[in-house]
Image (spheres, helix red, strand yellow):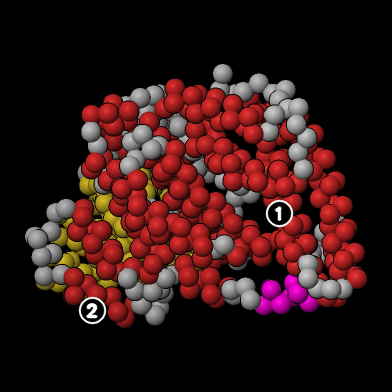
């Protein structure tokens, strides 16, 4: 058995000719292996039993020689892929599961039944160029460039990937080479394997943006440190997923999901400050702040698009005010283009940040400044911590907005950051508790959060109207203020309902 430890990158055609020189600059010596044409087929049953177990079964043929490969469930963190892998020579082209050591299979797996029902799901064909490099400190890294296609059900996707795999030596050297590569624009970290992409193509399940950020998967017995790593890994994957979604189908809401993932990372650093010192995240927090500032325009852009959509209830009113329409159109002209955003996601600084987050997580860099207190805190059950945290949040929120007080739009707008952080804590730790109870408790607060977002949109439109010195614009401002009042009334009902819901963590 081998355990792959590799980093995957998606590369544009512009950077491919630069790769040999970049490798040579990094390495002590480079061995250039002959290019190979690889024909691969991926197998599963009609009910996708292997996929359900996160097992990949592939046959590969090149130069009249074939092999079969099993990849078992592993871990993907950022662009780092770690999976147990087993390879056997193969006579013919059909795989034989029974040839593998029976001890490798998950408990209860029906190997014979699955073997009898296998068929090829999709194929990949590509030209592979390979370099084996010796590093200055004696390590070995294999670099492969794959250019070709994935084919399934009459559809095709392009493969243009660079993978660097640690053969011998320290993982730090793998990350050092990765840093060298992402210093070039047009190289970005890859989250999804060829197999994952192939299954989506074969099953006609394209990658789609999430409607909202979900809940970090946690077991009931997770420690505080395990919850920290799960939350950061979830958030990095969430960012990368929506980055890829944007390339498939550009959308402002997809960009908003990217910012949601970044905010979850920042919130996680704060949430686990018992074991994560500010010193260990100072550089990362600075870069996360930069990234959010680069995407700060997205929310206003969504607001402008929403209220000028023909499907929106306010469209007719706004469209009847030519001065406001002109202001909105002028602002839209200033927004970055799709090409600008694509270039940003390929930029060295953005990808270096994702690589730094991955390195921080894999190397457990938060441990470097630990004392005895942090070691003990790390082993505490996170469920106990979550209960205390949620109870304090709930108490503080009641203090901010007591049941007897009537709130106005300014009160709600000032509450936004505090409420969003409270909801993010639920995203981090809420999976420890009953799903139905959690959902019932969060619904009024999510309604309020959405209402605050809409209030901020109305405020933004009022600001665009302000100072125009036009009677029509003044009427629009008055109308927007009226809409704010209606919205606040609805939010007040949600707020009062929230006091009658039992906390789900008790």
Horizontally, is 17 left or right of 42 in the view?
left
- Sequence-wise, the earlier of marks 1 and 2 is 2
Horizontally, is 474 left or right of 145 in the view?
right
Residue 107 in the image: state x and y as whole percent: 36, 28
Residue 459 in the image: state x and y as whole percent: 74, 57
Secondary structure under the numbered disc 1 in the rendered image: helix
Query: What distance separates the C-alpha of mark 1 from that of mark 2?
Result: 51 Å
Is 280 or 143 nearer to us in this picture?
280
The C terminus is located in which quarter?
top right
Identify the residue position indicated by label 2 in the image.
Answer: 21
Residue 380 vertical placement versus 284 (above, below) = above
Secondary structure under the numbered disc 2 in the rendered image: helix
Identify the residue position indicated by label 1 in the image.
Answer: 456
Tell me, yes or no, whether the highlighted magenta stretch contains residue 112: no
Residue 32 in the image: state x and y as whole percent: 18, 73
Is 38 or 170 nearer to us in this picture?
170
Judged by depth in the image, the label closer to the viewer, 1 or 2, is 1
Is 82 or 269 nearer to us in this picture?
269
Residue 338 in the image: state x and y as whole percent: 58, 73
Observer able to see residue 434: no
Horizontally, is 482 left or right of 466 in the view?
right
Range drawn in magenta: 325-333
């Amino acid at each position: 058995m081998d355990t792959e430890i590799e980093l995957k990158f998606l590369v544009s055609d512009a950077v491919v000719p630069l790769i040999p020189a970049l490798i040579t600059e990094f390495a002590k010596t480079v061995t250039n292996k002959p290019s190979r044409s690889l024909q691969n087929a991926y197998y599963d049953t009609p009910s996708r039993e292997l996929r359900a177990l996160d097992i990949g079964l592939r046959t590969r043929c090149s130069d009249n020689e074939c092999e079969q490969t099993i990849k078992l469930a592993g871990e993907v963190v950022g662009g780092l892929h770690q999976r147990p892998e087993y390879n056997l020579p193969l006579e013919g082209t059909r795989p034989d599961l029974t040839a593998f050591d029976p001890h490798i299979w998950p408990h209860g797996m029906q190997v014979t039944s699955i073997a009898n029902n296998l068929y090829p799901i999709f194929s990949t064909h590509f030209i592979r160029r390979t370099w084996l490099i010796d590093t200055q400190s004696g390590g070995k890294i294999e670099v492969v460039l794959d250019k070709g296609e994935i084919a399934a059900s009459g559809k095709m996707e392009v493969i243009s990937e660079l993978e660097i795999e640690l053969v011998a030596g320290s993982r730090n050297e793998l990350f050092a080479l990765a840093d060298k590569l992402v210093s070039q624009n047009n190289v970005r970290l890859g989250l999804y394997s060829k197999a994952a992409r192939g299954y989506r193509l074969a099953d006609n399940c394209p990658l789609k943006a999430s409607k909202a950020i979900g809940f970090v998967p946690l077991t009931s017995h997770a420690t505080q440190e395990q919850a920290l790593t799960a939350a950061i890994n979830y958030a990095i994957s969430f960012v990368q997923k929506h980055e890829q979604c944007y390339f498939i189908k550009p959308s402002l809401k997809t960009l908003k999901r990217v910012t949601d993932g970044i905010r979850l990372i920042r919130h996680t650093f704060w949430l686990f400050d018992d074991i994560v010192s500010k010193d260990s995240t100072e550089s990362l927090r600075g870069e996360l702040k930069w990234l959010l500032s680069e995407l700060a325009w997205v929310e206003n852009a969504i607001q402008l698009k929403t209220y000028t959509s023909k499907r929106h209830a306010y469209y007719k009113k706004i469209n009847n005010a030519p001065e406001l329409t002109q202001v909105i159109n002028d602002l839209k002209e200033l927004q970055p283009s799709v090409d600008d955003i694509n270039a940003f996601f390929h930029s060295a600084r953005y990808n270096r940040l994702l690589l730094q987050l991955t390195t921080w997580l894999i190397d457990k860099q938060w441990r470097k400044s630990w004392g005895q207190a942090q070691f003990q805190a790390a082993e505490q059950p996170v469920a106990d911590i979550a209960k205390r945290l949620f109870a304090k949040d709930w108490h503080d929120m009641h203090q901010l907005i007591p049941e007897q007080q009537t709130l106005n739009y300014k009160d709600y707008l000032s509450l936004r950051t505090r409420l969003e952080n409270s909801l993010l804590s639920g995203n981090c730790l809420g999976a420890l508790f009953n799903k139905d109870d959690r959902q019932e408790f969060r619904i009024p607060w999510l309604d309020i959060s959405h209402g605050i977002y809409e209030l901020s949109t109305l405020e933004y439109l009022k600001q665009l109207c302000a100072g125009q010195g036009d009677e029509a614009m003044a009427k629009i401002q008055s109308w927007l203020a009226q809409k704010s009042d209606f919205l606040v009334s609805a939010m007040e009902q949600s707020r009062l309902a929230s006091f009658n819901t039992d906390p789900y963590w008790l």
